[in-house]
Amino acid sequence: MLKIYIASKYQEKARVIRELITNLGHVSTGGWIDVPDFAKPGRPDALLCQRAEEDLEDVRKAEALILIAEDDQEYSSGGRHTELGYMLALGCPVIVYGRRENVFHYLPEIEFVRNDQELVDALCRLRGTPSTTYLS
């Protein structure tokens, strides 16, 4: 079992990946996934600061990170990139799911996957177990 942090701009996409990793026996450390409007702009500064601190604590609990990239072809900004950098600094595995969004996604220590099956294969390699066929 791996403790995995899921970084994404959208909670619904993160929930789909959380279900996939849970079905594989892993655990998601990202509490933000179930908090409505987790970091919506316009919230009080103190609340946003608290949520940022909670988020980093959840990242620290993880052994690996999956970043769900955006669908468009533009470079992107956002909290998920901070979380990715934090995991790199901690020396933990990072998987980018979808597409490379910025220059840091090209680092050799980041694994890049394009679909659910490639994600399953990457998680099996991290866990040191034989790959399995993912059935949705």
Image (spheres, grey):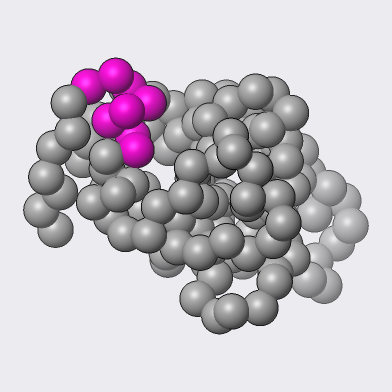
- Residue drawn at the location 29% of the way across and 19% of the way down: 128
Residue 15 showing in the rendered view: no
Q: Is residue 105 at all visible to an observer of this figure?
A: yes
Left or right, residue 7 beside residue 103: left
User: Residue at the spot x=14%, y=58% of the render?
Assistant: 136
Label count reads 0
Horizontal relation, residue 114 to residue 7: left or right: left
Q: Position of residue 126 (x, y in %)?
A: 37, 26
Q: Is residue 63 left or right of residue 104?
A: left
Image quadrant containing the N terminus: top left
Residue 21 location (% of width, % of height): 31, 41
Q: Is residue 60 magenta?
A: no
Magenta highlight on residue 127: yes
Please tell me which residue lies in front, 33 or 18. 18
Residue 132's place in the image compared with 7, above or below, is: above
Towards the viewer: 112 or 42 = 112
Foreground residue, 135 or 75? 75
Q: Tell which of 54 and 47 is nearer to you.
A: 54
Q: Which residues are magenta?
A: 122-129
